[in-house]
C-alpha cells in the first residue's frame, strides 16, 4: 500500500512539474488565485499569517523535530527517531534541489523578500514531512479513537494553514504549494516505510507496536516541559520574526 501510494503521489508530482514547465492551465490558475488574495490583504491578517507561516520554516521545524526526538526517546519509542529525520531531511534536501533545478522566480508582488526560488514551496513540504509524521505517531500510539481523529485533523489543519499562509502573503503560487505538499508527502511515505521496516525487523512485532509503557510522573513532567519549551520558542520566534518587506509590493497602488 505504501509503494502504491508513493507511485501515485510521484505521478501527481510529475504532472504538476509538467504543467509548470509547459505553462499550462495551472499557471493561469496561479495568477488568478494570487490576484484574488492580493485584493484581500489586510494588516491584521498579514500579522497572523506571518506568524502562521513560521510553522513551516525549516529551522523551526528542525527545532521542533529535536524536541520531538527527545520526547520519543523519553517515551521509549526510539524506532521513530530515524524515520522522522529521514522524512524531514529528505524533504528539505529534495526541496532545495528542486528549487535550484526549476529556477522559478517568486511572484513580483510578494509581501516580503525570499532569497530562494519559488517552486516548490519549502514551507509546505516541511509541514507535510514533520506534522504528517507527528500525526502518524499520534494515530498509532493513541488508545482512544477520538484522540486519533482529533490529532490527525489538528496536524492536517496546521499543514493546510501553513500552505495557505504562503499564498496569502504572496510568496508562492498555488502550484508551488501543491508541489510542496506532494514532495513532502513522498518523503513522509518514505519515512513511514522506513519505520515499518524497522518494526518488522524486530523479533516480536506485537511488542514493537505496544512497547510504550504507562508514563511515570517524571516522564509526564519532562514531556510537559518539552511542550512548553517548544511553544515558547515558537512565540518568541514569531514575535521577533520581521522579514524584509518587498519594495515593489509596498509601492503598489491600493486596490
Image (cartoon, helix red, strand yellow):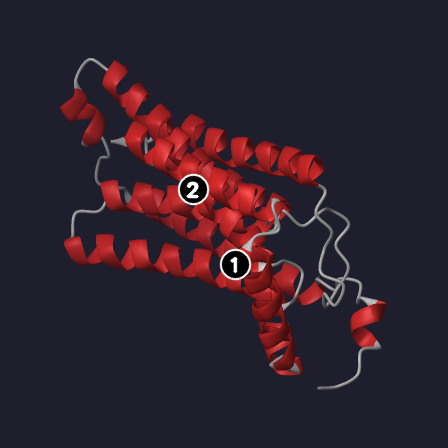
Asked if residue 178 lies left or right of residue 92, the reply is left
- Quadrant of the rendering where the C terminus is positioned: bottom right
**Residue 48 point in image, percent of width and height:** 58, 73
The numbered disc on residue 28 is none
Q: Secondary structure at mark 2?
A: helix
What is the crowding at mark 1: few (fewer than 14 residues within 10 Å), some, or many (at least 20)?
many
| Tag in front: 2 or 1 | 2
Is there any visible trace of residue 234 in the rendered image? no
Query: If the image is split into quadrants, where does the N terminus sit?
Result: top left
Circle 2 crowding by C-alpha within 10 Å: few under 14, some 14–19, many from 20: some
Rendering coords of residue 119 (x, y %): 63, 47
User: Quadrant of the rendered structure where residue 254 is?
Assistant: bottom right
Marks 2 & 1, CB-CB < 8 Å contact: no
Residue 233 in the image: above or below residue 196: below
* Alpha-carbon span between mark 2 and mark 1: 18 Å
**Nearest the camera: 174 or 232?**
174
Badge 2 or badge 1: first in the primary sequence: 2
**Which image quadrant is residue 18 in?**
top right
Residue 22 vertical position relative to residue 163 in the rendered view, above or below: above
Write the residue at 62% across / 44% down.
21
Per the image, label 1 sits on a secondary structure element best described as helix
Q: Is residue 150 left or right of residue 204?
A: right
**Is 52 left or right of 6, judged from the image as shown?**
right
Q: Which residue is mark 2?
A: 12
Is 108 left or right of 89, judged from the image as shown? right
Q: What residue do we see at 32% from left, 31% from top?
A: 76
Please name the residue shown 70% across and 62% down the image.
241
* Residue 152 percent across, percent down from the top left: 30, 53
Q: Picture coordinates of residue 178 (x, y %)? A: 50, 52
Residue 250 in view, yes or no: yes
Any mark on residue 163, and which?
1
Amino acid at each position: 500500500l505504501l509503494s502504491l501510494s508513493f507511485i501515485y503521489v510521484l505521478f501527481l508530482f510529475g504532472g504538476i512539474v509538467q504543467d509548470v514547465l509547459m505553462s499550462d492551465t495551472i499557471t493561469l490558475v496561479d495568477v488568478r488565485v494570487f490576484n484574488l488574495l492580493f485584493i484581500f490583504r489586510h494588516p491584521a491578517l498579514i500579522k497572523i499569517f506571518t506568524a502562521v507561516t513560521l510553522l513551516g520554516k525549516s529551522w523551526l521545524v528542525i527545532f521542533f523535530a529535536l524536541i520531538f526526538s527527545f520526547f520519543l526517546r523519553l517515551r521509549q519509542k526510539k524506532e521513530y527517531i530515524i524515520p522522522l529525520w529521514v522524512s524531514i531531511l529528505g524533504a528539505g534536501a529534495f526541496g532545495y534541489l528542486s528549487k535550484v533545478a526549476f529556477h522559478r522566480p517568486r511572484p513580483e508582488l510578494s509581501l516580503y523578500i525570499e532569497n530562494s526560488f519559488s517552486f516548490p514551496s519549502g514551507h509546505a513540504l516541511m509541514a507535510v514531512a514533520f506534522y504528517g509524521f507527528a500525526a502518524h505517531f499520534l494515530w498509532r500510539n493513541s488508545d482512544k479513537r477520538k484522540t486519533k481523529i482529533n490529532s490527525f485533523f489538528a496536524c492536517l489543519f496546521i499543514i493546510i494553514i501553513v500552505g495557505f499562509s504562503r499564498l496569502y502573503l504572496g510568496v508562492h503560487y498555488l502550484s508551488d504549494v501543491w508541489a510542496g505538499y506532494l514532495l513532502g508527502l513522498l518523503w513522509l511515505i518514505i519515512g513511514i516505510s522506513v519505520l515499518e521496516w524497522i518494526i518488522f525487523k524486530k523479533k516480536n512485532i506485537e511488542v514493537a507496536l505496544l512497547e510504550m509503557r504507562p508514563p511515570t510522573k517524571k516522564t509526564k513532567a519532562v514531556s510537559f516541559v518539552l511542550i512548553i519549551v517548544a511553544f515558547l520558542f515558537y512565540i518568541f520566534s514569531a514575535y521577533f520574526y520581521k522579514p524584509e518587506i518587498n519594495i515593489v509590493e509596498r509601492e503598489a497602488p491600493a486596490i
